[in-house]
Amino acid sequence: MGNLGLFFIGKKISMPFRSDCTKKRMANFFEVILEPFDLKGKNASHQPEIVSAKTKKGDHMYYSAILNMKGKKTVVVGGGKVAERKIKALLDACADITVVSPDLSDHLLRMHQEKKISWKQKTFEKDDVNGAFLVIAATNEREVNEQVYQSCEAHQLINVVDAPEKSNIIMPATFKRGDLIISVSTSGKVPGLARKLKNSLAEQFDEHFADYVEFLKEGRKRVLEEINDPEQKRMVLHQLLDKSFLEASNEERHKQLEMLLNANRSSE
Ligand SMILES: C[C@@]1(CC(=O)O)C2=NC(=C\c3[nH]c(c(CCC(=O)O)c3CC(=O)O)Cc3[nH]c(c(CC(=O)O)c3CCC(=O)O)/C=C3\N/C(=C\2)[C@@H](CCC(=O)O)[C@]3(C)CC(=O)O)/[C@H]1CCC(=O)O
Ligand SMILES: NC(=O)c1ccc[n+]([C@@H]2O[C@H](COP(=O)([O-])OP(=O)(O)OC[C@H]3O[C@@H](n4cnc5c(N)ncnc54)[C@H](O)[C@@H]3O)[C@@H](O)[C@H]2O)c1
């Protein structure tokens, strides 16, 4: 067990590490993910250039957002490998999914048998997209994907898996740790890199982050409820994000939170 000092508004508190392994992981955390690409050394003396919003003539910047897909009608055309990947993520987000395809992959068939998704066993027709919030054209036939795109109205979200330039929504590579969502996109240009970076990040932000984020969520709620002075509230919220909370065990975190709240309540 190592110890790390943390100052809570003038009061020093020690927090034990969970283990050497945790310590090593946490030490890496703030240096974040560049090792697999060996960028740190190469760019050490290089000042980053400020690039304009438009990187190349004709290119545009995307806007990233997090969609609430709960209960949203989603039509996926095609029942193969790519459809399956998109559908798994959509199911996690509680979307209401209908697949239009003459066949389904084994996994999708199981999901259908378990009543997790609906299946229209047929080839695509224009009316299949009616009423959909999100449409994904994921067949292996470029012309069919084009037909799906043409069938959508301007207000519908459409992802064409082989035509990012037509899509008004493209999917980033994503992983979740509880409420924490980390997504990587290359603006549609190099999906393999998005995937590689995501895998690298997922190793660094391991499963322990779910507990950590849960703790912060609760801690933040307590601070907002229990500390009245706005300036003190802001300062304590800032303290809560100190990396020593990340490095501590869950039990230790809660103890330190109580101390932090007590210290600030008493000085009000
Ligand atoms: C991130 C991820 C999310 C997901 O799909 O859920 C995703 N692609 C993934 C993997 C992947 N895709 C491809 C390969 C093969 C290797 C390679 O070619 O590099 C691999 C690697 C693999 O499968 O291992 C081939 C590919 N992808 C697209 C085209 C069409 C084109 O570029 O024209 C082609 C050529 C097809 C062909 O051969 O014809 C297009 C798109 N793929 C996107 C997302 C969107 C932009 C993302 C961004 O902004 O970076 C966009 C634009 C549209 C969209 O699908 O939303 C997912 C990682 C999942 C994960 O691990 O989490
Ligand atoms: N966006 C991405 O991440 C990504 C990654 C790899 C490949 N791709 C592209 O996605 C396409 C699909 O790849 P896949 O590996 O899932 O292919 P796949 O062959 O596994 O699946 C294609 C599915 O489309 C269905 N289909 C064919 N014609 C249809 C029609 N008229 N109506 C309804 N369904 C129909 C097939 O029955 C099958 O279920 C590829 O051709 C490739 O261009 C995209």
Image (cartoon, rainbow, N blue to C red):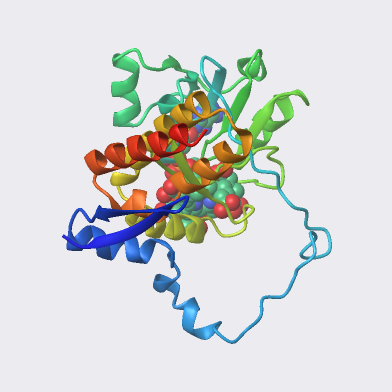
Residue 20 vs 223, above or below: the answer is below
Residue positioned most to the front: 267
Quarter of the image for residue 217 reads top left
Placement of the N terminus among the 4 image quadrants: bottom left
Quarter of the image for residue 116 reads top left
- Which residue is painted at 50% across and 42% down in the image? 236
Q: Nearer the viewer, residue 210 or 61?
A: 210
- Which residue is painted at 73% across and 30% down in the image? 150
* Left or right: 248 in relation to 101: left
Residue 236 vs 128, above or below: the answer is below
- Which residue is painted at 76% across and 23% down in the image? 153
Position of residue 22 measured from the top left corner of the image (x, y, whole percent): 24, 58
* Left or right: 30 in relation to 159: left
Q: Nearer the viewer, residue 210 or 227?
A: 227
- Which residue is painted at 29% across and 15% down in the image? 114
Position of residue 229 measured from the top left corner of the image (x, y, whole percent): 59, 32
* Left or right: 208 in relation to 190: left
Quarter of the image for residue 256 reads top left
Residue 132 vs 37, above or below: the answer is above
Q: Nearer the viewer, residue 265 or 251?
A: 265
Position of residue 23 measured from the top left corner of the image (x, y, whole percent): 26, 62
Q: Is residue 178 visible to the viewer in this orientation of the structure?
A: no
Position of residue 17 measured from the top left corner of the image (x, y, whole percent): 23, 56
Report how many numbered discs are placed on residues in the image.
0
Q: Nearer the viewer, residue 79 or 187?
A: 187
Residue 157 vs 34, above or below: the answer is above
Q: Is residue 225 visible to the viewer in this orientation of the structure?
A: yes
